[in-house]
């Protein structure tokens, strides 16, 4: 069972802790329809996610964290005005009078659909009982404007479209055919509805230990949106301050008009950046100003992942880990969305494509090492290893080094700060094989050779005097 609640580790703010003093290292994959059902028309529907099977899938790969996706719009429309897909359940009741643009009753934005919140709570509890943490997504950037032709137009199906609610809410006051003002502070009545919704979410899951919040997925960006996201972050923190439990709040990169500086300047506890600054190919060392969850959804789009291949995907996981970051994967899982089914390595015969298993499994491998090490005392030390990828603690008692070799076969590690001997372990990230090496004396730079072809992981832990061997 997941303990918690999580908070930023006071001694090593690159990570979370549950208050025990140990780091709680989070990593895992997520998929688009793990909260709401997505039905595509006139094509065949998406398969309904069996949530227990989904948790089995994550658990088998040693994942302990996922984003619980939220979609704000009830339907999308193509250029001819035909409905192309629907999402259900929605957070608000459809009471009418009158029909919305999708032919269903209009929304009453003052009345919540308890089914939505009950499902959210049930799924967070189910994850907690498996030792998993859930990032509860609150809003959705792909629900307020058509970002590309393949996703079609969500705005005519949004509850805040003037034609879709009985509350005289108009999320497009400038009449440009987009709902960008919905995710801004432009319309006070909308802000009030948002605050009531966020409060309802918090009331639903506040007592649960395994919760993190995410403001929204890939909003378009710009000053107005940034101000709105900062406002929602502060609202969550203020509202939860009067509750029994407080949870970490995250901001993920805006797209297409966002930048990582907006994340680092935010009041968020954790962030997910874009490729800007190397998060795709050579992640920078985390400095502890924010907990970084490096998510392929934002930093490493699937076409780029395919281009670097299995080896490059594996390298991204270990490079991120040794630079003090945690990783998330945007996983097609069993979603056969028609615009990428031929290119995204989506499901095969209703099962997740094993093409992505190297990436998935190596995320679990990093968690395995994170749980073994005293990660609270470790930080990225690129200069201590000739490969440039090193997590290290040079404490006089309990020193540890975790080094990634992208190519092998040898690496030089600077052990000058610690005079003790070290136990040596080599790990093969392509096979999971472990080989024990000969002990190494500290006090100098040491050259070590991997027993494997290709990339490798080197783990060294200080041994007490008299316990060598």
Image (spheres, rainbow, N blue to C red):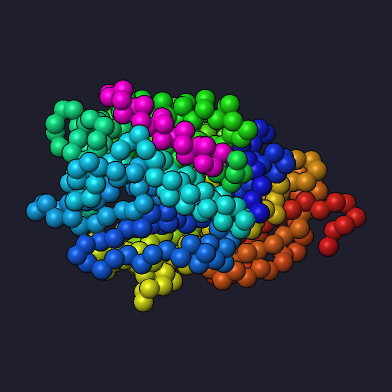
- Can you see residue 12? no
Q: Main secondary structure of the magenta part?
A: helix
Q: Of residues 252 and 204, which is closer to you in this image?
A: 204
- Quadrant in which the N terminus appears: bottom right
Q: Report if residue 195 lies within the magenta region.
A: yes
The quarter holding residue 312 reads bottom left
Q: Is residue 41 above or below residue 124?
A: below
Residue drawn at (52%, 53%) of the image:
122
Q: Of residues 99 and 230, which is closer to you in this image?
A: 99
Residue 197 locus on image (x, y percent): 41, 35
Q: Report if residue 68 lies within the magenta region.
A: no
Residue 33 locus on image (x, y percent): 38, 57
**Residue 182 appears left or right of 25:** left
Q: Residue furthest front?
A: 97
Residue drawn at (70%, 51%) of the image:
373
Q: Residue furthest bottom?
A: 349
Q: Is residue 147 above or below residue 288?
A: below
**Residue 353 appears left or right of 453:** left
Magenta region: which residues? 186-206
- Can you see residue 130? yes
**Residue 447 appears left or right of 156:** right
């Amino acid at each position: 069972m997941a303990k918690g609640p999580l908070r930023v580790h006071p001694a090593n703010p690159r990570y979370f802790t549950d208050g025990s003093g140990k780091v709680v290292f989070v990593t895992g994959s997520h998929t688009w329809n793990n909260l709401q059902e997505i039905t595509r028309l006139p094509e065949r529907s998406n398969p309904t996610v069996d949530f227990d099977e989904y948790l089995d899938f994550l658990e088998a790969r040693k994942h302990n964290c996922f984003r619980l996706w939220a979609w704000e719009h009830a339907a999308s429309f193509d250029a001819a005005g035909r409905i192309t897909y629907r999402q259900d359940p929605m957070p608000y009741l459809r009471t009418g009078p009158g029909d919305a643009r999708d032919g269903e009753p209009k929304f009453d934005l003052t009345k919540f659909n308890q089914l939505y919140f009950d499902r959210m709570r049930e799924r967070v509890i189910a994850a907690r009982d498996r030792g998993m943490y859930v990032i509860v997504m609150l809003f959705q950037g792909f629900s307020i404007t058509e970002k590309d032709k393949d996703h079609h137009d969500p705005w005519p199906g949004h509850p805040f479209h003037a034609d879709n609610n009985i509350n005289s809410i108009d999320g497009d006051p400038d009449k440009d055919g987009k709902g960008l003002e919905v995710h801004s502070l432009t319309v006070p009545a909308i802000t009030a509805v948002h605050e009531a919704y966020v409060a309802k979410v918090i009331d639903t899951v506040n007592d649960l230990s395994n919760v993190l919040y995410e403001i929204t997925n890939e909003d378009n960006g710009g000053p107005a949106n940034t101000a709105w996201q900062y406002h929602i972050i502060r609202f969550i923190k203020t509202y939860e301050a009067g509750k029994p439990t407080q949870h970490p709040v995250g901001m993920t990169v805006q797209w297409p008009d966002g930048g990582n500086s907006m994340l680092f300047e935010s009041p968020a506890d954790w962030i997910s950046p874009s490729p800007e600054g190397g998060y795709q190919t050579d992640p920078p060392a985390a400095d502890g100003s924010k907990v970084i969850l490096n998510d392929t959804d934002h930093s490493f789009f699937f076409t780029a992942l395919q281009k670097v291949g299995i080896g490059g995907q594996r390298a991204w996981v270990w490079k991120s880990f040794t630079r003090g970051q945690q990783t998330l994967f945007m996983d097609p899982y069993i979603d056969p969305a028609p615009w990428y089914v031929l290119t995204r390595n989506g499901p095969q015969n209703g099962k997740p494509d094993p093409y992505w298993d190297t990436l998935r499994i190596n995320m679990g491998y990093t968690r395995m090492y994170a749980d073994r090490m005293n990660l609270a005392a470790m930080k990225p030390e690129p200069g201590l290893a000739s490969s440039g990828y090193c997590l290290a603690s040079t404490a006089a008692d309990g020193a540890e080094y975790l080094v990634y070799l992208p190519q092998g076969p040898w690496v030089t590690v600077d052990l000058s700060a610690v005079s003790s001997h070290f136990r040596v372990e080599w790990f093969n990230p392509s096979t999971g094989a472990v080989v024990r090496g000969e002990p190494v004396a500290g006090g100098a730079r040491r050259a070590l050779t991997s027993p494997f072809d290709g990339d490798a992981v080197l783990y060294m832990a200080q041994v007490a005097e008299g316990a060598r061997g």
